[in-house]
Amino acid sequence: MSLSAIRLSVCRPLACARAGPSRLALVQHNFSRHESSSAALKRAEAARRQAASEPTFLKNDAIPYHIVRVVNPETNKLDPEIKLRELLAKVDLDKNYVQLISAGGPDGAKPIVKIINKQEASRKEREQKSKKKEQKKTSAGRETKEIQLSFTVEPGDLKHKLDKCIKELEKRNRVVVVFVKKKSAPMPSPEQKAARLQAVWEAVQHVATESQPRLVQEATAALYLQGTGKADESETCESLPAATISSTHAAQSAVV
């Protein structure tokens, strides 16, 4: 064997040994690229599923479709199909954004998008938040308060209790006004009990409705009220509590 042949036989294994890791690394690299592509497809499919269930959450580059149709802001009709990237290039994204309105359908219908003005969207969002806050405040004011009075209540105490009752009704709370008989006091007649309830109702009707029928029993009488909030000044009569005190005091004198 010649010297050159010996050198060739010795060098080949070394070359293969050097090439081995390089080729292995190439195979691993291709495999990892294949994994990334698969993961990207999965993410795209997940985005499409999200688009189908919650389309309004996807905007601009997050929209997982290549071809879309735009709602024309002037005619409110659909414009011809357009590539999403072309649409984004035309829109002033500093002032507007493209929002997905509906996903593509199984019948081949293209996804629908709309160009939204950021300033207008912020205004509407503030209005919605304010409305929700008001609704939450309204729903929170659904406590039930009980105000107890005796049939022989003194005018000063009656005025204090009526003021408290009106404040609760202005908060849209429920209030139950209950009249009870004191042990030492005579029993009022059914007419006198009804007169007590009617007098209270006349004092609070500008901020309340009756939530259920009045209750008149042997030793008690009750008025069930649902607050409706603060009334307009034109509807509020400040003389009502005073009139109620007078009528109730007169009825009290009749009982005594």
Image (tube, rainbow, N blue to C red):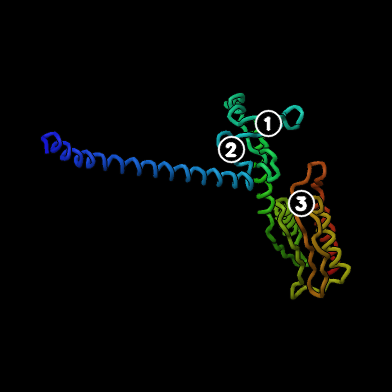
Residue at mark 1 to residue at mark 3: CA–CA distance: 52 Å
Label 2 vs 1, first from the N-terminus = 2
Q: Amino acid at mark 1?
A: Glu
- Quadrant location of residue 58? top right
- Can you identify the residue that label 1 sits on? 81
Front in this rendered view, residue 157 or 68: 68
- Can you identify the residue that label 3 sits on? 228
Closer to the camera: disc 1 or disc 3? 1
Image quarter hosting the C terminus? bottom right
Residue at mark 2 to residue at mark 1: CA–CA distance: 15 Å
Image quarter hosting the N terminus? top left
Residue at mark 3 to residue at mark 2: CA–CA distance: 46 Å
Where is 76 relative to 230, above or below?
A: above
- Can you identify the residue that label 2 sits on? 63
Q: Residue 15's x, y, as percent?
A: 22, 38
Badge number at residue 101: none
Q: Residue 65's x, y, as percent?
A: 60, 37
Q: Amino acid at mark 3?
A: Thr
- Quadrant location of residue 94? top right
Local crowd size for mark 1, using a 10 Å CA cut-off: few (<14), some (14–19), many (≥20): few
Front in this rendered view, residue 43 or 61: 43
Q: Residue 49's x, y, as percent?
A: 60, 47
- Quadrant location of residue 34? top left
Q: Note whether residue 256 is visible.
A: no
Secondary structure under the numbered disc 3 in the rendered image: loop
Secondary structure under the numbered disc 1 in the rendered image: strand
Label 1 vs 3, first from the N-terminus = 1
Count the labels in the image: 3
Left-right relation of 201 to 7 = right
